[in-house]
Image (cartoon, grey):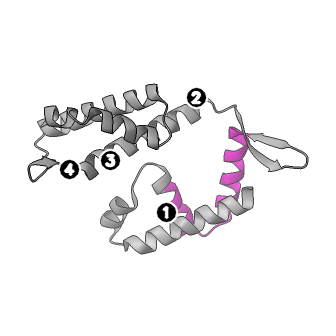
Amino acid sequence: MLEKIYTYHTKWINTAKKFGATKEEAEDIVGDMYLIIGKMLNKGLNISYGDDVNYFYIYKCLKTSFLQLKKKQLKENSTSLELVVDIKTAEYLDFNQKNELVEEELKKLHWYDQKIYNIIQDDCSITELSKQTNISYHSIYNTYRKVKTILKQKII
């Protein structure tokens, strides 16, 4: 199966580039995807879709690898200046200051909203959380979206 997946190597590279990765990052992401899928295939995962490959599974794997890479880069560059608070005065906040602002604003929200936001930010998907807690997917999604909107409005 891995050989069949590899036949679409250029397609996977282009998909990773569409996420916003550079050529080198895209190659790393695709390499990670091969490793992950190889491990899962050894555990008995079946990602075939008829006679072909399940593209959606590979897409999700690529997207997750891309997001993990960007998260890692963000942590490494935590001192970089990223957010314009007031365009007229061109004041910038570094990563640590933004995190402090987010934490302060998050503490002002309802405990349920805080929990949902923090759990999803810690790499738990909405679907997984929904299955684990028996709370409807849409309820969790709406709460998470509401919290993100509130935080964006307060910080920017």
Q: How crowded is mark 2: few (under 14 residues within 10 Å), some or many (20 or more)?
A: few
Q: Compare marks 1 and 4 and give the one earlier in the sequence.
A: 4
Distance, label 2 to label 4, CA atoms, is 34 Å
Distance, label 3 to label 4, CA atoms, is 9 Å
Is the C-beta separation of discs 3 and 4 under 8 Å?
Answer: no
Callout 2: SS:
helix
Distance, label 1 to label 3, CA atoms, is 25 Å
Is 116 positioned to the left or the right of 55 in the image? right
Taking the spot 33% from the left edge, 33% from the top edge, the residue there is: 30
Q: Compare marks 1 and 2 and give the one earlier in the sequence.
A: 2
Is 29 in the magenta?
A: no
Looking at the figure, which quarter contains the N terminus? top left
Where residue 146 sits in the image (x, y, percent)?
A: 58, 69
Is label 1 or label 2 in front?
2
Q: Compare marks 1 and 3 and give the one earlier in the sequence.
A: 3
Q: Determine the main secondary structure of the stretch shown in magenta.
A: helix
Distance, label 2 to label 3, CA atoms, is 26 Å
Distance, label 1 to label 4, CA atoms, is 30 Å
Question: Disc 2 marks which residue?
Answer: 76
- Inspect the image, locate mark 3, and give the three-letter code of the amino acid beneath it: Tyr
Question: Disc 3 marks which residue?
Answer: 59
Q: How crowded is mark 4: few (under 14 residues within 10 Å), some or many (20 or more)?
A: some
Is 115 in the magenta?
A: yes
Residue range of the region highlighted in magenta in the rendering: 94-118
- Inspect the image, locate mark 4, and give the three-letter code of the amino acid beneath it: Asn
Q: Compare marks 2 and 3 and give the one earlier in the sequence.
A: 3
